[in-house]
Image (tube, coloured by chain):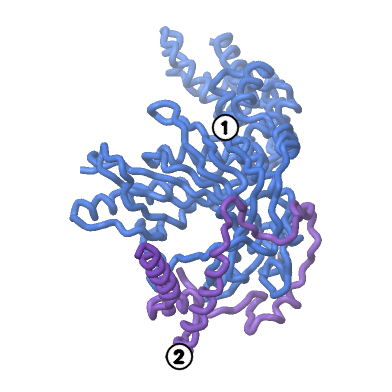
Chain colours: A blue, B purple
Amino acid sequence: MSREYETVIGLEVHVELATKTKIFCGCSTAFGGAPNTHTCPVCTGMPGSLPVLNRQVVEYAMAVGLAANCSINRYCRFDRKNYFYPDNPQNYQISQLYLPVCRDGSVEIETPAGKKTVGIHEIHMEEDAGKLIHDEWGDCSLVDYNRSGVPLIEIVSEPDMRSAEEVIAYLEKLRMMIQYLGASDCKLNEGSMRADVNLSVRRAGEEAFGTRTEMKNLNSFKAIARAIENEKNRQIDLLEEGKKVIQETRRWDDVKEYSYAMRSKEDAQDYRYFPEPDLVPLEISEEWIEAVKSRQPEFQPEKMQRYKKEYGLPDYDAQILTGSKYLADFFEAVTELCKKPKKVSNWLMGETMRLLKEQEMEPEDISFSPENLAKLIELTEEGSINGTVAKEVFEQIFAKDVDPVSYVEEQGLKTVNDAGELRNIILQVIKDNPRSVADYQNGKEKAIGFLVGQTMKAMKGKANPGMVNQILRELL
Amino acid sequence: MYIREQEEQTLQEVEKKQDKNIISDETIEYVGILAKLELSGEEREQAKKDMKEMLDYIDKLNELDTAGIDPMSHIFPVNNVFREDVVSNGDDRENLLKNAPETKDGSYLVPKTVE
Ligand SMILES: [Zn+2]
């Protein structure tokens, strides 16, 4: 049934910028402070207070815009968006409606069907709202304005996406770009990146768009995918039943896996925008744009080429490592210390990625130091520990950032390279396993594997397997 | 004959213009919702009258030919006023909270608000 329909999706992505201070006042943007300790008369909307624009916000917005192939509006301005809600102490949000800072851009995404371009309608600057905490016991809510006035950019795409996969590819692309710029850490689970999904359906082949809804409260890629699937089906069901889709804002509940309409008719969405009188307009000069351009970092495609050339990494390694700015930085830091790029790459792409995935973490959540991974690689390279022990030690590094040199020492994990000691243990193994010995001597090559295993077990994994193999063959 | 017709037309237009600004009950109700105001019957009638007068006054400005003139949003010819990204405010919570009618645990206390 749903095959007859096409899903049309556009995204509004809010990104909290990595400035030290808020957009219009000198309050800190640090995350996690005690309630209302990062506030002042401006960001709590006290009468008579006046906003002054943070230059860095404009720079970040321009940098993101340039990376997304936008044109920069040489003349731009802020507007007031009026609405009443306790998280918004001024009763208006300072945003940009008429003359946003960036317009008409595009990003390229990879889809199973090949490359696809998603248009960027505009990028504008605005301030974030405070946080409401609902009192479980009383009939009241508590308001914390630490987040009020934290700078945001809103990236508005064209309705160019057709599936959840495309939406996620687009978001991943944006996130990577913005992380490369250092403009935000883009953490969906902490709300520094938030995506609202505008979705409509239409019969395949139809030109006109259907009525769209806007979905909010999507805190992970998985929630986004689930919400898109759910909303698409809800709209198709309505149309199939001969009903109409109502244009509305809906809130996604990821636990119950359903959405509900957020605002009643009583709270009509009429924001009565008008030019913000407390802020003067911006005139962005050609020189300023050029200066921001000249500071743009090396983005993923260039970095990938450099990794292949400079470090001799295979295509696959270079692509995975540069897929995350954090992973790439980490790779470079470890390589700088131990000068073994391929080994570093193996540890990051293998064990590190495995543990990250297992614990549902992102590369930016890596908490161990490059030094300790570099030391572990050196220990392995000089033959002080074998591969199995190295993996064990790495789990400790990953979890607790232990110093592998002292950890190996303390736990007595050093590979026994003393042939005499090994020989004694192997003699014992041979004595204890006459059947396998006989099997081997009768030409069953596989039996030696069992004997190596028994020796490793007796040595608690600390033996050098190559050496064990060699001595065994000598003795048999 | 021709001139009279034209005069009549202008007169009609003037009347239409005045009618245009009559505030309906629905409009005043809607504005009340947006402004979060509850008005008594008397206050409503007064507000309708006041708003009509304001709109009539604004219409005067529309009589000017403004074609080719950029809308002005600020009266001063000043652009690009910035601050640098440096933390300059400390923790002034106690003082700020004094402005709130009710507080709890370092936060502003408001009637329960859930989306
Ligand atoms: Zn402030």
In which quadrant of the rendered view does residue A424 lie? top right
Note whether residue B62 is visible: yes
Residue furthest out toward the front: B1
Q: Which residue is drawn at 39% across and 42% down?
A: A164
- Identify the chain of the residue marked 1, using the numbered disc in the image: A
Disc sitting over residue B32 in the figure: none
Q: Mark 2 lies on which chain?
A: B
* Circle on res. B40: 2
Tell me the residue at 33%/43% (across/down).
Answer: A7
Kind of residue at disc 1 = Gly
How far is the residue under mark 2 from the one under mark 1? 62 Å
Q: In this view, does A381 lie to the left or right of B32?
A: right
Tell me the quadrant of ligand 1: bottom right
Q: As rendered, which of A369 and A29 lies closer to the eye?
A: A29
Where disc 1 sits, the SS reads loop
In which quadrant of the rendered image does the N terminus of chain A lie? top left
Q: Position of residue A343 (x, y in %)?
A: 64, 23
Task: From the image, tell me which residue sits under label 1.
Answer: A323
